[in-house]
Image: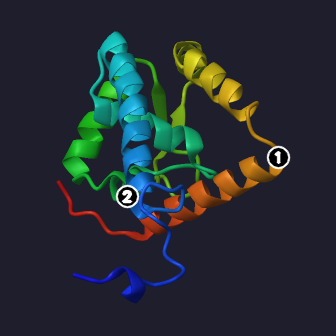
């Protein structure tokens, strides 16, 4: 066991904002609260929680999304992604289209009406986020956003096992 004087002088004391355990607990709590809302949306829409995860990926994709890229992002098998997209298309949340010169390429798009329904459902989350943002100055928000984006980049680089 390390003695007090042997500890790194730059290490944050336990329970402070820079303590890894504190970050882990706060991130798990945030994830749990968002998951609770996501599960509620999934249940209200007759979807699986994985379907809602897929919708988020489609919504946030900066370019047209293919089933293959969705599969890679979610760590699912091709069959599981096909079943997920079938459910989402049947429920009116997404549409698949062949818009490129290569007719084998399928793009997945979020339907506007479904997007509006999701916005309505998640409005309390947006409002809670805005109330929270109002409690921080721009420099603090910038640092928090930089932290989250960097963490997401690190997590995105991790390879997940296929289900």
Mark 2 or mark 1, earlier in chain: 2
Q: Which mark is residue 150?
A: none
The coloring applied to the image is: rainbow
Q: Nearer the viewer, residue 113 or 10?
A: 10
Q: Can residue 97 be seen?
A: no
Could you tell me which secondary element the residue under label 2 belongs to?
A: helix
Task: Please tell me how many numbered marks the rendered image carries.
Answer: 2
Q: State which quadrant residue 149 falls in.
A: bottom right
Q: Measured from the top left, where is residue 150 in percent x and y?
A: 58, 64
User: In the figure, is residue 59 to the left or right of 55?
Assistant: right
Relative to 143, say whether 127 is above or below: above
Determine whether, in the image, residue 38 is placed left or right of residue 114.
left
How packed is label 1: few (under 14 Cα within 10 Å), some, or many (20 or more)? few
Left or right of 27, for residue 101: right
Instruction: Please give the residue where the numbered disc 2 appears in the rendered image.
Output: 21
Disc 1 marks which residue?
Answer: 138
Residue farthest bottom in this picture: 6
Q: Position of residue 90 (x, y in %)?
A: 35, 20
Counting from the top left corner in percent of width and height, residue 96 is at 46, 36
Quadrant where the N terminus is found in the figure:
bottom left
CA gap between label 2 and label 1 equals 26 Å
Q: Residue at x 63, y 51 (%)?
A: 62
Whether residue 118 appears in this view of the structure is: yes
Q: Residue furthest left?
A: 163
Mark 2 is surrounded, within 10 Å at the Cα level, by few (under 14), some (14 to 19) or many (20 or more) other residues, namely: few
Residue at 46 percent across and 62 percent down: it is: 19
Above or below, 9 against 75 in this view is: below
Residue sitting nearer the eye, 75 or 24: 24
Q: Residue at x 67, y 59 (%)?
A: 146
Q: In what element is the residue under mark 1?
A: helix
């Amino acid at each position: 066991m390390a003695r007090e004087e042997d500890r790194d002088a730059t290490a944050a004391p336990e329970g402070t904002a820079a303590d890894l355990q504190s970050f882990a607990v706060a991130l798990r709590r945030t994830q749990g609260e968002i998951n609770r809302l996501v599960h509620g949306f999934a249940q209200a829409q007759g979807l699986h929680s994985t379907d809602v995860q897929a919708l988020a990926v489609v919504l946030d994709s900066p370019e047209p999304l293919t089933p293959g890229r969705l599969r890679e992002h979610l760590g699912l098998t091709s069959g599981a992604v096909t079943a997920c997209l079938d459910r989402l298309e049947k429920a009116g949340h997404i549409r698949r289209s062949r818009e490129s010169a290569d007719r084998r390429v399928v793009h997945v798009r979020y339907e506007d009406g479904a997007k509006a329904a999701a916005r309505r459902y998640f409005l309390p989350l947006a409002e809670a986020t805005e109330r929270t943002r109002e409690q921080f100055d721009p420099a603090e928000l910038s640092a928090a956003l930089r932290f989250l984006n960097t963490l997401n980049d690190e997590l995105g680089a991790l390879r997940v096992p296929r289900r």
